[in-house]
Image (cartoon, helix red, strand yellow):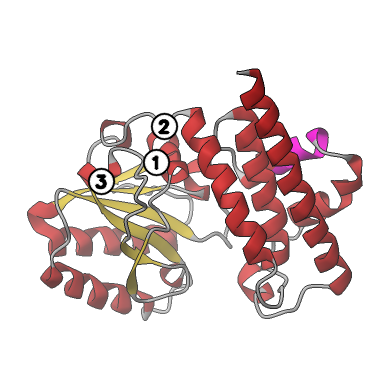
Amino acid sequence: MAGPTVYPELNVVLEELLSSVRAILGDNFCGAYLQGSFAFGEADEHSDVDFIVATHGVVTEVQLAALQEMHGRIYASGSWWAQHLEGSYIPKDRLRRVDPEQTRFPFLDNGSSELVLDDHCNTAVVRWLLREYGIVLSGPEAASLVDPVTPEQLQEEALRMMGIHVDWAREGAMNRWKQPYLVLTFCRMLHTLHAGVVASKKESAEWSLDALAPEWTALIQRALEDRPDPSGRYYKPADPEVEARTLEFVDYASTYARVRSGARQGGS
């Protein structure tokens, strides 16, 4: 693996991850890929590292135990990047097509050292991004493993996820990480509903600045600029006025999406 990113320390972590995963999975290893912001080419020193490991079959209990130990060891290495890996282990036959059952697979959350069963990566968005932009760490091109994802599948998922995020927006106290994340995520879902593709948060926000009502310009621009040290902002409460404005934006975006979606279906 010859430097998949511009960050040497991260490349060392990825090399350790890849060599360990290959040793543990053996013949069950199919391929390993970067997706997310690194695939889009918009990652920076604060980005989490989204990965997918495709397997030929289900990860066995013995393999899962070894993967658990390996992730704990990598997390404890002291590297910042080692503590911000995020990804799933998915059998290639389940990765092939969008899964309406939303099956849970072994998943490592950003900031965690332990795999849990979760459907976090089992989405149309991840498949689309993996197929269109995925960075191969090892294995075949991702397009050979993932069938094309249709605009309709992406739009249907965006509407469903928007409803989930509307509820999540009001769960618990809002911190300075969650607040801009909500704004940019809703911009991204709105862009997907509009274009039938997935764009980066930055590109989606810039589209939203032109497409949405001018009253939201300041909030969106603030979210775009509020990038440095996202993990540090997780422990700081959001400004109450900005929080209230964000919840108003969530409601606005949800209504905007339903109206536009209804108009699109009515015109089809």
Which one is in front in this view, the residue at disc 1 or the one at disc 3? 3
**Residue 97, quarter of picture:** top left
Amino acid type of the residue tagged 3 in the rendering: Arg
The residue where tag 1 is placed is 127
Q: 168 and 125: which one is in front?
A: 168
The answer to whether residue 206 shows anywhere in this view is: no
User: Crowding at label 1, few (<14), some or many (≥20) Cα neighbours within 10 Å?
Assistant: many
- Write the residue at 70% across / 69% down: 170
User: Crowding at label 3, few (<14), some or many (≥20) Cα neighbours within 10 Å?
Assistant: some
| Image position of 206 (left or right of 97) | right
Return the x and y of residue 229 as percentages of the image width and height.
Answer: 66, 68
Measured Cα–Cα span from mark 1 to mark 3: 11 Å
Q: Element at badge 2?
A: loop
Residue stretch rendered in magenta on the structure:
205-211
Q: 24 and 219: which one is in front?
A: 219
Measured Cα–Cα span from mark 3 to mark 2: 14 Å
| Residue 208 drawn in magenta | yes
Tell me the tag on residue 177: none
Image vertical order of residue 203 relative to residue 35, above or below: above
Marks 3 and 2, the one that precedes in the sequence = 3
The answer to whether residue 39 shows anywhere in this view is: yes
- Write the residue at 50% across / 61% down: 48
The residue where tag 3 is placed is 94
Residue, far left? 27
- Write the residue at 84% across / 54% down: 219
Tell me the tag on residue 149: 2
